[in-house]
């Protein structure tokens, strides 16, 4: 998998744009300053700690020995390879498991896409529940893969130079401060996605009523059918969320690469 480096603003991530395109969330206010928005996330005591770490970063630590250029380059290459491996694993897992085609390789993935029951569901909420659990399983997959990656990258970056060691310390502090808030916000995505599921299902039912047709759940996963479209939307959101979660690790990689050059 080729590593990408999207230029994503705090208020206009791909995830927000996807949610907005699906009418699941209002577009972020582009007039809101980054510092003001971030200030709403950071407690006063945390701000003091960040300020202290940032002050030390400016002062620098000349006592740390810098690895040789060969060792430095090898460490950077290893870090990039690990990032690419994790990113490739997650992309592969999401794209394969979100395919509604029963004959596709999705059946071989460790997270299986729910398929419709033979009979129409009694309620939309009951029909959506398996897809909410499917999305949440992928979120747990991302967390268990990306968080250790970020920790390992910080460790590698910290050994590269005094400047990068301070960057690693700042990253660790930001993760500690923002992780709980990020987790709460991302946990709302599968709840927002329910509205898209309901919209497509109701449109499907209305089309059947207009044409005087009976419903057949077996046809829901056919190309362009409502459930196949929903699975495509769900895949888009999962990939956008993965990109968002990978951005701190991507920043460390880019800093490491630039320091090597």
Image: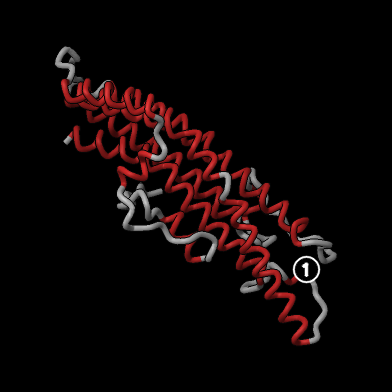
Specify the color scheme. Answer: secondary structure
The residue positioned 35% from the left and 48% from the top of the image is 10
Does the rendering let one see residue 161?
Answer: no
Work out which residue is located at the far top of the displayed protein and give it. 63
Camera-nearest residue between 131 and 124: 124
Q: Quadrant of residue 196?
A: bottom right
Q: Quadrant of the C terminus?
A: top left
Does the rendering let one see residue 30?
Answer: yes
Camera-nearest residue between 156 and 103: 156
Q: Quadrant of residue 169?
A: top left
Q: Is residue 210 left or right of residue 254?
A: right
Q: Position of residue 242 (x, y in %)?
A: 47, 47
Up-down relation of residue 35 to residue 52 (above or below)? below
Q: Is residue 51 left or right of residue 235?
A: left
Neighbours of disc 1 within 10 Å: few (<14), some (14-19), many (20+)? some
The residue carrying mark 1 is 217
Query: Element type at marker 1?
Result: helix
Q: Position of residue 137 (x, y in %)?
A: 63, 43
Q: Position of residue 139 (x, y in %)?
A: 56, 43
Up-down relation of residue 27 to residue 45 (above or below)? below
Q: Position of residue 31 (x, y in %)?
A: 31, 57
Q: Quadrant of residue 58?
A: top left
Up-down relation of residue 167 to residue 121 (above or below)? above
The residue positioned 47% from the left and 34% from the top of the image is 179
Up-down relation of residue 6 to residue 121 (above or below)? above
Camera-nearest residue between 226 and 49: 49
Q: Is residue 66 left or right of residue 208?
A: left
């Amino acid at each position: 998998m080729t590593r990408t480096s999207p230029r994503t603003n705090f208020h206009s991530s791909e995830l927000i744009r996807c949610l907005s395109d699906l009418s699941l969330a209002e577009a972020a206010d582009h007039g809101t300053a980054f510092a003001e928005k971030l200030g709403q996330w950071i407690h006063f005591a945390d701000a003091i700690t960040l300020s202290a770490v940032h002050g030390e970063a400016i002062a620098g630590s000349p006592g740390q020995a810098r690895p040789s250029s060969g060792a430095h380059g090898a460490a950077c290459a290893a870090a990039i390879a690990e990032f690419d491996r994790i990113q490739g694993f997650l992309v592969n897992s999401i794209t394969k498991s979100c395919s509604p085609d029963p004959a596709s390789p999705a059946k071989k993935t460790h997270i299986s896409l729910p398929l419709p029951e033979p009979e129409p569901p009694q309620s939309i909420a009951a029909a959506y529940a398996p897809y909410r659990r499917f999305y949440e399983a992928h979120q747990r997959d991302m967390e268990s893969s990306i968080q250790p990656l970020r920790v390992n990258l910080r460790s590698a970056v910290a050994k590269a130079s005094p400047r990068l060691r301070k960057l690693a310390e700042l990253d660790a502090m930001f993760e500690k401060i923002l992780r709980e808030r990020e987790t709460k916000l991302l946990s709302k995505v599968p709840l927002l996605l329910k509205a898209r599921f309901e919209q497509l299902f109701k449109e499907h039912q209305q089309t059947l009523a207009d044409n005087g047709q009976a419903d057949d759940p077996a046809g829901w996963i056919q190309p362009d059918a409502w459930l196949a479209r929903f699975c495509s939307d769900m895949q888009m959101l999962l990939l956008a969320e993965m990109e968002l979660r990978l951005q701190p690790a991507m920043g460390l990689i880019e800093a490491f690469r630039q320091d090597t050059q």
